[in-house]
Image (spheres, rainbow, N blue to C red):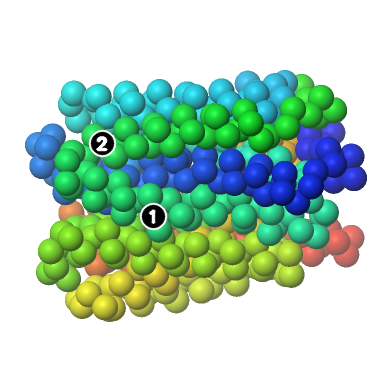
Amino acid sequence: MNDTIPAQNAPQLSKGALLMIEIALAIGGFGIGTGEFAAMGLMPSIAGNLGVSEPQVGHVISAYALGVVVGAPLLAIAGARLFHRHLLLLLMSFYALANIASALAPSYQSLVAMRFVAGLPHGTYFGVAALVVASLVPPNQRGKAVSRMMIGLTLAVLIGNPLATWLGQSMSWRYAFVLVSGVSILTVVLISLFVPFNKQQIRNNPLLELKAFNRLQVWLALFIGATGFAGVFAVFSYLAPTILQVTGENKMWIPIVMAAFGLGGFCGNIAGGWLFDKYQFKAVGGVLLWSIFILLLYPQATSELWSISLAAFLVGTIVAVSPPLQTHLMDAAPGAQTLAAASHHAAFNTANAIGPLLGGLAITAGFGWSSTGYVGAATTTVGLIFFVIALRLQQCNLTGETVTG
């Protein structure tokens, strides 16, 4: 049973109405993305204020990622019977409260706990939002529709994260999470105004959704996301201290280099939607090969400001893997699309946990801040192996072959 609205049965909307839906959902993505990445740009500030090391602040990032991993499947299953509009409103309201709690956290331990809580609605929001926009366009335009909705997340890295970093450096890191809460409240208002209430939406039985989710192609796609994108987080999580310790630049340059990463993410996101509509699942493999090349190049580029800025931009373009993998997952899990779409972001935040953890281990072992690029290339190679297996299975299914071994 498919829980999206078939395009031919979807509410008839004008281009303007569809645009406002996409904008409303993208602003929610902007708020969530800013909240997800805020601690990365403010790593030195948080460490100094709470009296912990920068690698320990990496655990704050990992706690949020773990919250996404736990929350995405649980909330997708719990919300399977809800209308998409109502579920989106609940998720963003929860996110606003969790970020206020993060801003008020009195200690390192409480901040770790609050970031875990804040991560819970992340995956389900993006999953449901992707289902909503994909259901409102023809099938051959779904990749572009998902990428347009995801623009908010890439703009969070381009604009939101540098803004949060500047705000945290100028006042306190706590104000960055206040900003995120404000954007989340704005999203609640916009969803209320523009996202239609579709009474014809099919609402699934949670147990049936779990059963439909249990497919090998679904799990392989999740493994691709969890390992293939870990390299981006390994690099990005430690970009701020790398600029200070390796490049030797003033902290004022951190938001600028972060913005270069965000611009790369913006370009990569648009390219990813186009690539899926043109090449389908094969687009994922192409992006993974590109990722390995860029991550191997990164350590050679950290000594100069211009080169680390360019490298940050190129690492950002790896975001191109997200729209094709997201859309492929929805195709691979008919009858469990809410759970699959949400779990895509759980997989990416498993990457967000793996990347900083392995990167931090390499740094602590004495390999240096730049070694995160090599760590990332290794994890992406694992993702490429999962992709090759998944592509082979897909080709065998299309030709009616039997896979042995």
Location of residue 388 in the rendering, given as x and y in whole percent from the top left corner: 64, 65
Residue placed under numbered mark 1 in the picture = 159
Secondary structure under tag 1 reads helix
At x 47%, y 24%, the residue is 94
Secondary structure under tag 2 reads helix
Query: Distance between the Cα atoms at labels 2 and 1?
Result: 16 Å
At x 33%, y 26%, the residue is 100
For residue 60, side relative to residue 36 (left or right): left
Residue placed under numbered mark 2 in the picture = 175
- Please state which amino acid type lies under the numbered disc 2: Tyr
Q: Is residue 346 visible?
A: no
Q: Nearer the viewer, residue 279 or 254?
A: 254
At x 22%, y 75%, the residue is 305
Occupied quadrant, residue 6: top right
For residue 87, side relative to residue 304 (left or right): right
- Please state which amino acid type lies under the numbered disc 1: Ile
At x 69%, y 54%, the residue is 145
For residue 12, side relative to residue 233 (left or right): right
Quarter of the rendering occupied by the C terminus: bottom right
Q: Nearer the viewer, residue 336 or 167?
A: 167
Disc 2 packing (10 Å; few <14; some 14–19; many ≥20): many
